[in-house]
Image: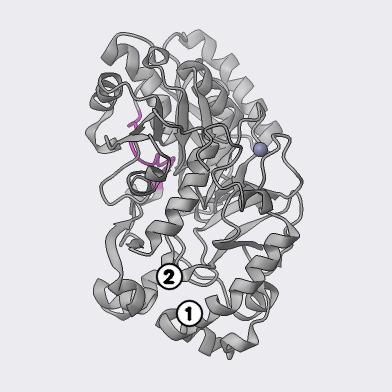
Amino acid sequence: MTDENRKYFNMKIEPLLNTREMRKIQEEKLASTMRFFYDKVPFDRDRMDQAGVTPENIKSFHDLAKAIPITGQADFRKVFDQFDNDMARSYLYLFGKERMDDMYLLTTTSGTTGIPTPYPVFHKTTEAMGELFGRIGWRCHFRSGDRLAVGFGLSMHAAGTPHLLWYRRIKGLTIIPIGAEVGTERLLSFIKLFKANILSCTPSLATYLIEKSREVLGHPVKSLGIKTLMCGAEPGAGIPEVRNRLESEFGANLYDVGAGYGASCNHPEYQGMHWVADDYCHYGLVDPKTHEPVPMENGATGLAVFTPLEPESTIFMHNLRFTLNDIHQVFTEPCPCGLSGFRYKIVGRADDMLKVKGVPVYPAAIQGVINGFIPRVTGAFRIVLDVPPPRVIPPLKLKVEYGENIGEAELPVLEKEIKEKMHAINKIKPEISWLAPNTLERAVKKTQFLEKAYEKK
Ligand SMILES: [Zn+2]
């Protein structure tokens, strides 16, 4: 399989994604998966014991969903407490001795609050993830001769490290680990110096580079010659306005990746990310409140829940029915782009959800509307919370930066337009206070859209 023009990285497996044949493969792997977790991972064994089931009782993913509650970061934190924050003992319990003996790299989430969630990488992970990231990279048109500048955080940051480890399965690709930590000036200079033609980073950093390029390099970001932008780790790349702006300013194709094993496609209209990992990880949805399974039907929405089917070689999701706390919408009908794999769109993070008069509102959706008004606004904004989320006492308060070329006289009209669009799209009528351009701090990793005014009281 060396043909540079082939449709998929793996021509044998990828055509089977999201087919009945693939579901058979998944069901066949379930028995050994359950056995592995019961025999080798104390955390999951305890979960099965508490549910009163043995591996033999679980014959289908339906049985699994009925028997075992979902788990995630919050449960990990309980385990850390239980072991007095002794990470070595916590990891043994959570991941099992066999995998911990095989660990060779330990990374975490960006960890904005409390103890960050661990993402260990095992030697056995290398093969499996080389395959999955090969599939993802190939769909993002990584090819021989390309140079990939990694602009995700690299210091204990799970979004960056996979690039260094697993895209090497794409022959001829050179990876340049610059990292978000160096700051935008050095990032831009290194991209230019080493003639990188692919850039991976958060969408907010990519947006910031548009502003910074003229200042640092003295020319628009388009002159860098980036052909592919790979964005993830936060919503944005799936928002039409953000996407259009990044593609036209960089003169590049933008691919949205993450929140699981997937990548968006080249279709002009955003179709969500194609899930490429059916044979390695089972994907399901549950109701975010009741945790009852939600059928995988076209357009269905729910909390995404993952069960690894090659548990010895996992990354990101290491346990039975693990959730990263993202609300997804799925599309099971074939994509107009012609590529395989059902698609998922990120609606928002379950813990970011705000409720304004009972209506769920996600910061990502607000960002979409705001970014649609660039360049009349800079795109930077904050949601000011007077009480702890999710409850918001209306009106929802926004701080928004107006654009460089906007005079104060134009603000009332702009404000009216933004409010109308918010009402049409998000069903809210926000209160807007204006800030001068570049007042708000720009994040190189994850943008924090919430300003917790209640903490300052
Ligand atoms: Zn597609």
Q: Quadrant of ligand 1?
A: top right
| Residue corresponding to mark 1 | 36
* Of the pair 146 and 35, the residue shown nearer to us: 146
**What is the C-alpha distance between the residues marked 1 and 2?**
8 Å
Q: Is residue 362 magenta?
A: no
> In the rendering, at what x and y percent does residue 364 appear?
54, 40
Q: For the residue labelled by badge 1, is the local secondary structure a helix, a strand or a loop?
A: helix
Look at label 2 and name its amino acid.
Answer: Glu
* Colour convention: one colour
Give left or right: position of 448 versus 254: left
| Residue corresponding to mark 2 | 312
> In the rendering, at what x and y percent does residue 121 appear?
34, 61
- Residue 271's disc is none
Look at label 1 and name its amino acid.
Answer: Phe
What span is colored magenta in the figure? 440-453
Residue at 52% from the left image edge and 15% from the top image edge: 411
Q: Is mark 2 within 8 Å of ligand 1?
A: no
- Number of dots carrying numbers: 2
> In the rendering, at what x and y percent does residue 261 appear?
52, 51
